[in-house]
Image (cartoon, rainbow, N blue to C red):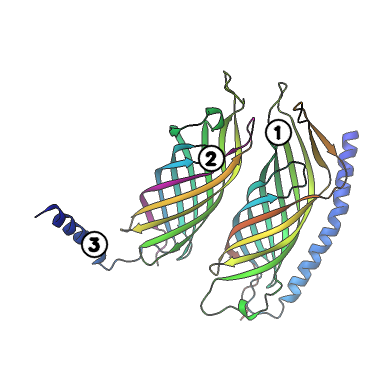
Amino acid sequence: MGIHQKITGLFLLVSTLIYSQERPSYFQPSLLRASATIAPTRFYTQQTTVALINGFVEYALENRISVRGEANIMAPNGKLLYTNSPEKFPRNFISIYAGFGYHLGKRNWKFDIHAEPGIAISEMAQQPFLIVPVSYQWGVSPSYMLKVGTSFYFSKYCHFFAEINYSNGWIRKTPLTSVSIAQYGISAGLGFHLLTKKN
Amino acid sequence: MILFAKIQNQILSYLRYMKGILLIFTLTLGFCFLSQADRKHTPAGMLSLGGRTTVSLFNDHENEMTGTGVGGQFRLRFSDAVNTDWFFDYITSDILNYAHRTDYHIGWSVLFYPINNLDYFRQKEEFKPKFRPYILAGHCFDYSKIEAKASPLDGPMSAERWSSAVQAGLGTHLELSPRFDISLTGQYMIHLGNHIETDYDFTTGALSFNEHKGASLAGHVLVTLSLNYKIAKLWGFTRR
């Protein structure tokens, strides 16, 4: 049996396992889900890509509506690709969002849209040019996040998710022009869920 | 003693100003309760909780640029046609590249639904998403702080003030489920009271702050997008 036949057979087997059983719908009101993952994120106005550690908790209020809170923390030495001057990018960066989600799709495969107002907490150098020792200051900036994604609930306790997010804001506590934190990123992985109320 | 007299004057002027607002608020409440007397299924007493994002445009402050903000609100409905928003906003903006401004707003708005009696808004067996436009007006207290970008050697340079404001505008809810809505509001907010002016010399780079006392009609346009979820019904349960 050639490799093509083996791959086709594997696909058939997996699809049979997924669709042959009449599974209950796991996404229901009172479903609580959470996950943590690493989210590569591009601060496109700063030409900088960083690794953010992303974690979220979400609770389904209705069949289509959920409330969600999430946080992103810039990983230590998390700058993956960096082409700008260090004084123009935060040394530390944390963002916290809380908002609502809207879920489309039937049964266990959902398309999700999220809108979440929030804040970005960042530590910026306070000298316009590199002077040693550099002084830093923390600041809190308003921000928001928009997110689209998809989730597949394959068991009573686990699901896969993949999301693309866009968020924006300005760090004003800077010695020169304010720094834009406009960014887009991706996150994907294994999530865990639990129905908190019995039907 | 001078400081005490200043504070006393400030409080007295606020009380005089607040008397008018309280009168309007009491009358509004009275109309709300009267208008719902003959209704069986009333949304009165519905409490919503939500988050919001605000953009501040056309600021009166010289050289102030578009601001962005975040906040939260709860919404308490008094009758079929009248709702109220109780909000908090944290807004930051730039004054070119020589200073930045932070505003904290805490206040309330009355929302009036002028076309709520149309057949389009009647509760049907099956829910369908719908727009619900409204007119709003209200009042808020605000704290503003303007800080220089480049700190002089003797420490950060800033000026701050407390003031009061009134706002009015238009908006619409997009009701996506019986309990969840997205609301878009555009309103003009006029600040009443002391205001701070910045003088910047573009040749020397010297910045100074001047505080002006007394009423001035400095204001800005606020565009707010909020997400709200009804969490409780505090009164007005359906009568048998």
**Residue labelled with disc 1:** B98
Q: Viewer-proximal residue, B69 or B108?
A: B69
* A57 sits to left or right of A120: left
Looking at the rendered image, the disc whose residue lies closer to the viewer, 3 or 2, is 2
Which amino acid type is marked by label 1? Tyr
**Residue labelled with disc 3:** A15
**Residue labelled with disc 2:** A45
Residue B49 x, y percent position in the rendering: 60, 58
* B121 sits to left or right of B164: left
Point out the tag, 3 or 2, that comes first from the N-terminus: 3
Q: Name the element at disc 1.
A: loop
* A119 sits to left or right of B2: left
Which amino acid type is marked by label 3? Ser
Task: Report if residue B148 is visible in the image.
Answer: yes
Q: In which quarter of the image is residue B50?
A: bottom right
Q: Name the element at disc 2.
A: loop
Task: Report if residue B1 is visible in the image.
Answer: no
Which amino acid type is marked by label 2? Thr
**Which stretch appears magenta?**
A173-198
In the picture, the disc for residue B141 is none
